[in-house]
Image (spheres, rainbow, N blue to C red):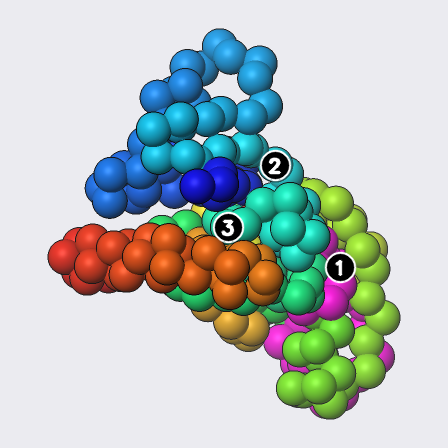
Amino acid sequence: MRYLTFALGKGRLAKQALATFEKIGITCQEMKDKDTRKLIFVNEELKLKFFLAKGPDVPTYVEYGAADIGVVGKDTILEEARNIYEVLDLGFGKCRMCVCGPKEAQELLQHHELIRVATKYPRIAKDYFYNKKHQTVEIIKLNGSIELAPIVGLSEVIVDIVETGSTLRENGLGVLEEVCPLSARMVVNQVSMKMEHERITKIIQDLKEVLAEGGQ
Ligand code: PRP
């Protein structure tokens, strides 16, 4: 039996992914050691390997088959647009992709004005404004702390992730429009899905059952 390799997006998602996998008997003791500098973890018994990667790199590893399975946010899947199968909504990491800004900017979204939109997600922003709203905008790519942009006058609005809404509130901004709901998803390499069909569909099925039990 060959190893099945999992790529997990670093951080909160990875922790929750491991907790979910544990419920279906997929464990990786090695990975729980907080002080480890190891990059790849093995469960010899189940013939599984796990590694942590930056979120936006997870779809890349999965597309090229360096990982058979990935766990990553829907935002990253949409933004990276890789050739991979999205097979399951894991139900955690729930948040929303939104157009946000000061209240005054609401008006600018209604009249097809040429506005500036700052975002870490240029593909998602472009798709939303060009294909859904048919509004021509200038998209400015940023790498973090997106909420700064409308405050310092870089852009009129932003497209960003909203979870609790507290970052917006504390900075005098609000949600103006919702682009789409987000959560963690399981993704699979297209060749692995065929070559390891039985093992992978069993994992998907088992996960579906524990998710259903959890009221997801
Ligand atoms: C994300 C997002 C918002 C914030 C939303 O940023 O970009 O800034 O979380 O969460 P809230 O609605 O609960 O306040 P993250 O912390 O990932 O860092 P970033 O600003 O570097 O993208």
Q: Which residue is mark 1?
A: 118
Q: Residue furthest left?
A: 213
Quarter of the view holding residue 30: top left
Taking the image as shown, residue 15 lies to the left or right of residue 59, namely: left
Q: Which one is earlier in the sequence, the residue at label 1 or at label 3?
A: 3
- Specify whether 139 is left or right of 198: right
- Left or right of residue 183: residue 97: right
Q: CA distance from mark 2 to mark 3?
A: 13 Å
Magenta range: 105-124
Q: Amino acid at mark 1?
A: Ala
**In this rendering, position of residue 19 left or right of residue 93:** left
Q: Callout 2 environment at 10 Å: few (<14), some (14 to 19), or many (20+)?
A: some
Task: Tell me, yes or no, if residue 156 can be seen here.
Answer: no
Q: Dot 2 lies on which element?
A: strand
Q: Which residue is at the far front?
A: 1
The residue at 55%/26% (across/down) is 40
Q: Nearer the viewer, residue 135 or 107?
A: 135
Amino acid beneath label 3? Ile
Label of residue 131 in the image: none
Q: CB under 8 Å between callouts 1 and 3?
A: no
Decide if ligand 1 comes within 8 Å of the CB at mark 2.
no
CA gap, disc 1 to disc 2? Answer: 25 Å
- x and y percent of residue 76 in the render? 61, 56
Foreground mark, 2 or 3, reads 3
Q: Secondary structure at mark 3?
A: strand
| Residue drawn at (43%, 61%) of the image | 197
Q: Which residue is mark 2?
A: 53
Q: Tell me residue 61's x, y (percent).
A: 65, 47
Q: Position of residue 12 (x, y in %)?
A: 45, 37
| Residue at mark 3 | 69
- Inspect this view and state whether residue 214 appears: yes
Please identify, in this view, whether the residue under mark 1 or under mark 3 is nearer the observer.
Answer: 3
